[in-house]
Image (spheres, rainbow, N blue to C red):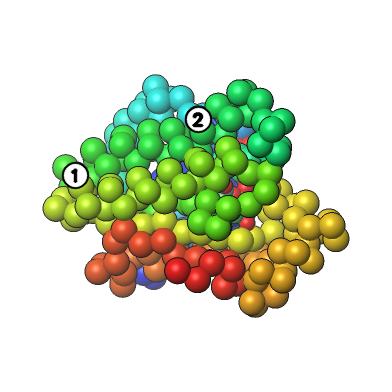
Amino acid sequence: MRLKGKVAIVTGARRGIGKAVALALAGEGADLVLVSKNLQEEDVVVQEVKDLGRKVLVKRVDVGEKEQVEAMVEEAAAFFPRIDILFNNAGVCKTAMLWKLTPEEWDEVIRVNLSGTFFCLQAVSKIMMSQESGSIINVTSSEALLGTIGQVNYAAAKGGVHALTKSAAKELARFGIRVNTIAPMADTDMTKLIAHDPRFKDKYLERMPLGRFAGPEEIGPTIVFLASDESGFITGQTIGIDGGMVML
Ligand SMILES: NC(=O)c1ccc[n+]([C@@H]2O[C@H](COP(=O)([O-])OP(=O)(O)OC[C@H]3O[C@@H](n4cnc5c(N)ncnc54)[C@H](OP(=O)(O)O)[C@@H]3O)[C@@H](O)[C@H]2O)c1
């Protein structure tokens, strides 16, 4: 087991990529703090992680609320002896053309995707700085790297995540903390329309050399790698797990 004895916080863990990554990390031996806006003890992911024999702390948190994030990290640091990994994944998207985008749609997407990522990064990195080790994996998007119609708010937020990852990687390297980001493309609730509606699906597949959407479980192995010591000389990088859609 590559992560035995390590502790990971996974945000957006109730479904989609977050759930799949939580199970991948647990499968490699990590104990987990599962965080999500609507998470409950009864949720499938909680039972599945327990069935793998891992310890779990379940936290219902809105990552866009700084006080909730800080209280969650404080509790996690008291519950577990250390925090080794943050998969900073919670996100939302609200699709609208630029000229129809409301201030509320702009604010909510920036609040959750950009401020939420920052709040988790800041609170967890303070614990990791005292340990002098840690691996943080943020989540950006090809929408930010390439630009996409109907996603000005989301692209701005994820572009911010891409940029803050590099600055955080430079600031935190001296404390033994690595910070990377992934740009995934997977079939989840968030991508239901583009992955299944023929009006969008074919256009997306044309842009993806491997010609298909991944299942969320295909994202897990890269996160295990980035979380583990095997990637010990990798920091400040954006890794596309997107069938070749973005080639940097
Ligand atoms: N799927 C893709 O192809 C793709 C592509 C590029 C980037 N991404 C990014 O990858 C991440 C995961 O996406 P996904 O496809 O797995 O999406 P998803 O299936 O819609 O799941 C999103 C998760 O984020 C949680 N969440 C949303 N708002 C939250 C908040 N304010 N506080 C805490 N948790 C919150 C949700 O919580 P609840 O379940 O508790 O409601 C859910 O568990 C997101 O950052 C997304 O932007 C995805």
Instruction: Say which amino acid is labelled 2.
Output: Arg
Question: In the rendered view, would you say 42 is above or below 68?
Answer: below
- How far from the left and from the top, in percent, is residue 154? 57, 42
Foreground of the two, 191 or 103: 103
**Image quadrant for the N terminus?**
bottom left
Sequence-wise, the earlier of marks 2 and 1 is: 2
Q: Residue placed at 70% from the left, 52% from the top?
A: 191
**Does the numbered disc 1 mark a residue whose Cβ is under 8 Å from ligand 1?**
no
Q: Residue placed at 22% from the left, 52% from the top?
A: 170
Label 1 crowd bin: few (<14), some (14–19), many (20+), radius 10 Å? some
Give the side of residue 67 with respect to residue 168, left or right: right
Disc 2 on helix, strand or loop? helix
- How far from the left and from the top, in percent, is residue 239? 44, 65
Foreground of the two, 204 or 176: 204
Q: Residue placed at 57% from the left, 34% from the top?
A: 109
Note whether residue 43 is visible.
no
Residue 215: image quadrant is: bottom right
- The residue tagged 1 is 129
Foreground of the two, 233 or 225: 233
**Does the numbered disc 2 mark a residue whose Cβ is under 8 Å from ligand 1?**
yes
Instruction: Say which amino acid is labelled 1.
Output: Met
Q: Which disc is residue 111 wearing?
A: 2
Instruction: Report the residue that reaches farthest toward the right.
Output: 198
- How far from the left and from the top, in percent, is residue 158? 49, 46
Give the side of residue 123 with respect to residue 137, left or right: left
Question: In the rendered view, would you say 97 is above or below 222?
Answer: above
Report the number of discs.
Answer: 2
Label 2 crowd bin: few (<14), some (14–19), many (20+), radius 10 Å? some
Disc 1 on helix, strand or loop? helix
* Quadrant field for ligand 1: top right
Question: In the rendered view, would you say 246 is above or below 64?
Answer: below
Instruction: Report the residue that reaches farthest toward the left.
Output: 174
